[in-house]
Image: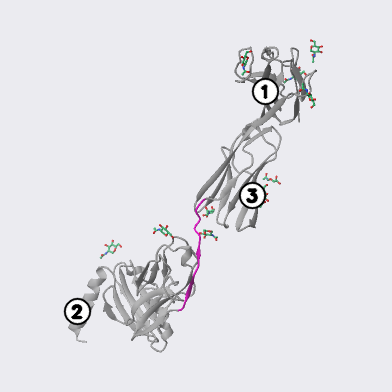
Amino acid sequence: MPPLLQYVLFFTVSTIAQETPSMTLNSKFRPTGSEVELAAGSAFTLRCYGNGSSAGWSTSAFLLRFQNTLGKKLEVSRSDPRHTGTYHCGDRSTWIHLYIKDSADPSSVFVVPKRIPTLEEGQDFLFECLVTDLSVSKLALRREAGGLPPGMTVTLDPQRGALIRNVSLAFAGTYVCSAQKDGKEFTSKPLLLLVVARLRRPPDISIGQVFFIRVVGESLEITCRTTNPNHSFNVTWTHTHLQGLNVTVRQQYKDNQLHKNITVTLPSVQMWHSGQFICIATNQAGIATATARLTVVDAPYLRVYRQPVQQANVSTVQMTKKLVVDASTNRTFSSGGANGSAVAEASVVEVWEGRDVILSFLTEAYPPLRHHQWDTPWLRNASHQESSFSQQDSTVDLVSIPTRTQHLLLQQC
Ligand SMILES: *[C@@H]1O[C@H](CO)[C@@H](O)[C@H](O)[C@H]1NC(C)=O
Ligand SMILES: *[C@@H]1O[C@H](CO)[C@@H](O)[C@H](O)[C@H]1NC(C)=O
Ligand SMILES: *[C@@H]1O[C@H](CO)[C@@H](O)[C@H](O)[C@H]1NC(C)=O
Ligand SMILES: *[C@@H]1O[C@H](CO)[C@@H](O)[C@H](O)[C@H]1NC(C)=O
Ligand SMILES: *[C@@H]1O[C@H](CO)[C@@H](O)[C@H](O)[C@H]1NC(C)=O
Ligand SMILES: *[C@@H]1O[C@H](CO)[C@@H](O)[C@H](O)[C@H]1NC(C)=O
Ligand SMILES: *[C@@H]1O[C@H](CO)[C@@H](O)[C@H](O)[C@H]1NC(C)=O
Ligand SMILES: *[C@@H]1O[C@H](CO)[C@@H](O)[C@H](O)[C@H]1NC(C)=O
Ligand SMILES: *[C@@H]1O[C@H](CO)[C@@H](O)[C@H](O)[C@H]1NC(C)=O
Ligand SMILES: *[C@@H]1O[C@H](CO)[C@@H](O)[C@H](O)[C@H]1NC(C)=O
C-alpha cells in the first residue's frame, strides 16, 4: 500500500473513532443495518471501533446470545447456521445482521430456539424462527397441521421471526415457520406453544371469625385461609402495632388449588395486643385482605341490657338500651323482680292486664354464654322465644309472654 493511502486510511479510521461506534466484518467497513450472508463453515471476524464501543458485541444468535463478554473483536473460526442473528455493538444503534447459510442442509433454512417458555394468556410472543438464507420469500407462520387459529395476528420479520400478539388459550399447539425458495416450501422445526390462563383475581382469603375477645393471659390463635391456583402467592399477618408475629403455615395442594393456612398465635395475650390483625395475600393479579379485631379485657364480664321494643304493647314509655345487670367477674348470679343482685329500676315493666308483652334483653358476655333461659315461678314455657347473635358475643333475647313478673337466670361458662 502506498504510504499516502495508508495515511488516509488511518486518518479515516481515527476520525470515525471520535464519533459513534463503527464496525468491520472481515476487515471491511459496514454501515449500520447491513445484512450479509455467509456460507456455513467459513470464518468471520467482527470488530467494533469508536466512542461507545467499549461494551463490545452482543447478539441474538442462538450460539452466542448467552455469552455476555464478546468483546470489541468477535472471531468465529467455523460458522454455523445458529450463528445467524443480529450483532449489536456498544449502544445498540450500531448493528449488522448475519445469515449463515448451509446449502447442504435444507433443514437449516430456519434456526429456532431449543425450547420456549410456557406463555401466559395476553402476552406477546416472538417465535424466533430465524431465516439463514437471504434468498427465501413468502415467510409465514402456521400450525403444523396447517393454517392459523382464528384471531391470531402475526408480524413476520426475516431478522427476528414471527411476533404473535396477545396469545390466548386457544393458540396452544404446534407451529412451524415456512418460506419458499425456487417454488419449494421449507419449514422450521416445529415448536410447541403452551399457554396458561392469566390470573384474573387475587387469592381467595377468609378468616372464620372477625371479632375476638380475650381476658389477659389467655391464648389467641387466628387462622387465615387462602387459596391460589399455584405457588406464586404470598400471605402474611400484620398487626396495627405489633411486630414479629409468631405465625405457622400449613399448605396442601388439592383440586388444582394451593390451600395455605397461616395461623398467628399469641400464647398469652396482654392489653396492648388489642387491635387489628390483617391477613394480606398477594399474587400477580392483586392483593386480598381480611381483618380480625382483638379486644383484650382484664376480667370476664356479663352485662344484660333491656332493649326498647317497638311492637311491645307496654304502657310504660319505652326507653333506650338500659343496663339491668352487670355481673362482670361474677360467675353465677340471678336477678329479677325487685330484689336481684344488680337490678335497675327499668326492670319493672308495667303492662295492661290480659295483653301480651314482649321483652327484649341484650347480653354481652365473655366468655360466651354457656346457657341461658327464662324462668318464672308460674310458667316454664314462654309462648315464643328467639335468640339472635350479633357482634362481640352478645345475645339478644326476645320473649313474648303473658303479663307477669320475670325472673332471668343466666350462667357463664
Ligand atoms: C464519548 O462519549 C462520552 C459519553 O459516553 C462523551 O462524554 C464524550 O464526549 C464522547 N466523545 C466523543 C469524542 O464523542
Ligand atoms: C387480547 O385477546 C383477548 C381475547 O383473547 C381480548 O379480549 C383482548 O381485548 C385482547 N387484548 C388486546 C390488547 O388486544
Ligand atoms: C402461577 O400462575 C400464573 C398465572 O397462570 C403464572 O403467571 C405464574 O407464572 C405461575 N407461577 C408458577 C410458579 O407456576
Ligand atoms: C410460636 O408459636 C408456636 C406454637 O404456638 C410455639 O411453639 C413457638 O414457641 C412460638 N414461637 C415464638 C418465638 O413465640
Ligand atoms: C385449613 O383450615 C381449614 C379449616 O380449619 C381446614 O379445613 C383445612 O384442611 C386447612 N388446610 C390446610 C392446608 O391445613
Ligand atoms: C412474594 O414475596 C417474595 C419475597 O418478598 C417476592 O419476591 C415475590 O415477588 C412475592 N410474590 C408475589 C406474587 O407477590
Ligand atoms: C295495644 O293495646 C291497645 C289498647 O289496649 C290496642 O288497641 C292495640 O291494638 C294494642 N296494640 C298492639 C300492637 O297490640
Ligand atoms: C359479684 O356478686 C356479689 C354478690 O353476689 C356482689 O357483692 C359483687 O359486687 C359482684 N361483683 C361485681 C363485679 O359485680
Ligand atoms: C326477693 O324478695 C322476696 C320477697 O320480696 C324474698 O322472698 C326473696 O328471698 C328475695 N330473693 C333474693 C334472691 O333476695
Ligand atoms: C306450656 O307447655 C305445655 C306443654 O308444652 C302446654 O300443655 C301448656 O299449655 C303450656 N302453657 C302455656 C301457658 O302456654
Q: Nearer the viewer, residue 167 or 69?
A: 167
Mark 3: is the Cβ under 8 angstroms from ligand 5?
Answer: yes
Q: Nearer the viewer, mark 3 or mark 2?
A: 3
Query: Which secondary structure, mark 3?
Result: strand
> Residue 49 occupies which quadrant of the picture?
bottom left
Q: Is residue 380 magenta?
A: no
Residue position for label 1: 361
Q: Nearer the viewer, mark 1 or mark 2?
A: 1
Mark 1: is the Cβ under 8 angstroms from ligand 8?
Answer: no
Q: Nearer the viewer, residue 172 or 3?
A: 172
Q: Report the residue that reaches farthest toward the left.
A: 4
Q: Which residue: 62% across, 52% down?
A: 260
Which region shows up in magenta?
189-201
- Disc number placed over residue 261 in the picture, else none: 3
Query: Which secondary structure, mark 2?
Result: helix
Report the magenta stretch's main SS.
loop
Q: Which residue: 48% across, 75% down?
A: 114
- Disc number placed over residue 41 in the picture, else none: none
Q: Nearer the viewer, mark 1 or mark 3?
A: 1
Disc 3 crowd, CA 10 A, few/some/many (<14, 14-19, 20+):
many
Kind of residue indicated by mark 3: Asn
Residue position for label 2: 8
Q: Position of residue 394 (x, y in %)?
A: 66, 29
